[in-house]
Image (cartoon, rainbow, N blue to C red):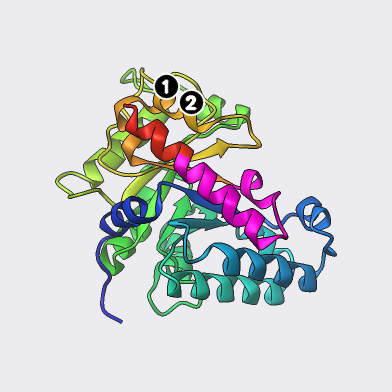
Amino acid sequence: MSALEPFGTRLRHAMDERGPLCVGIDPHASLLSAWGLDDNIAGLEKFTGTVVDALAESVAVFKPQSAFFERFGSRGTAVLEKAVRELRAAGALVVMDAKRGDIGSTMAAYAETFLHKDSPLFSDALTVSPYLGYGSLKPAVDLARENGTGLFVLALTSNPEGAEVQHAVREDGRTIGATMLGHLAAENAGAQPLGSFGAVVGATLGDLSSYDLAVNGPLLAPGIGAQGATPADLPGVFGEAVRNVVPSVSRGVLRHGPDAAGLRVAASRFADEIREAVASV
């Protein structure tokens, strides 16, 4: 397989065509139970297959959380491999939510697991942690450029604990979070219509006008739905960068299963509400 078009280009087109929505696939035990499924490999297969069958042809982006599959060992990973393959075959983009971060050959191995075109888990993008230093991500950055894939770097996360690192101030007066955004802006310089190196920025954080979110790349925004943020909140959080936001909804959509029609209606409603909110800016 030859290198794909850059992830940012494919993401822009997918959101324009299918709507600006990312659906998280988070098969945790309580959600399986709410669907009437057992917390075992059979329940995992049923849950994942239902989401894929219902939404793969209409939603732009999916974000499977790898930990909820890995906890079942090799059989869970096989379910994840199948889901990734089927989602991408249906024209959706897959952002693997694995939050990997390490140094040297280990970071390279993580990158190859999710971003190498011959890997069974080959995804369109990967979430990564830069807190061993942004430079530690270089193997993933290089492989993403080579294969037309992308990265989402943890920058301003919505969990309260994140502030002690991300809001810490460096000697140059910038916070760590702002420093990460600066690195991403440099990676995306000159990219059209959108760079491939994005940030994870929580939709629940309120006014972020003190941060320069104009990184010419996508902003993956968890927190819509069950965590309390709404599509209408997006312009107030992201300002003029809101058109590049990839709002991620998990339980807000998944709680409407196992009924396939319910899943489709919920996803369509969120996509329409997000599109309307973005258009208002």
Label for residue 236?
1
126 or 45: nearer the viewer: 45
Quarter of the image where one finds residue 146: bottom left
Mark 2–mark 1 distance (CA, rounded to whole Å): 6 Å
Are circles 2 and 1 on residues that touch, CB within 8 Å?
yes
Reading the image, the residue beneath label 2 is 233
Magenta residues: mostly which secondary structure? helix
- Which residue is rendered at x = 46% and y = 77% of the image? 119
Disc 2 on helix, strand or loop? helix
- Which residue is rendered at x = 62% and y = 63% of the image? 51
Relative to 252, does residue 2 appear above or below in the rendering? below
Label for residue 74?
none
57 or 159: nearer the viewer: 57
Quarter of the image where one finds residue 177: top left
Amino acid carrying mark 2 in the image: Asp
Q: Is residue 222 left or right of residue 48?
A: left
Amino acid carrying mark 1 in the image: Gly
Q: Residue 237, position in %: x, y? A: 43, 24
230 or 280: nearer the viewer: 280
Placement of the C terminus among the 4 image quadrants: top left
Placement of the N terminus among the 4 image quadrants: bottom left
Disc 1 on helix, strand or loop? helix
Range of residues picked out in magenta: 250-272
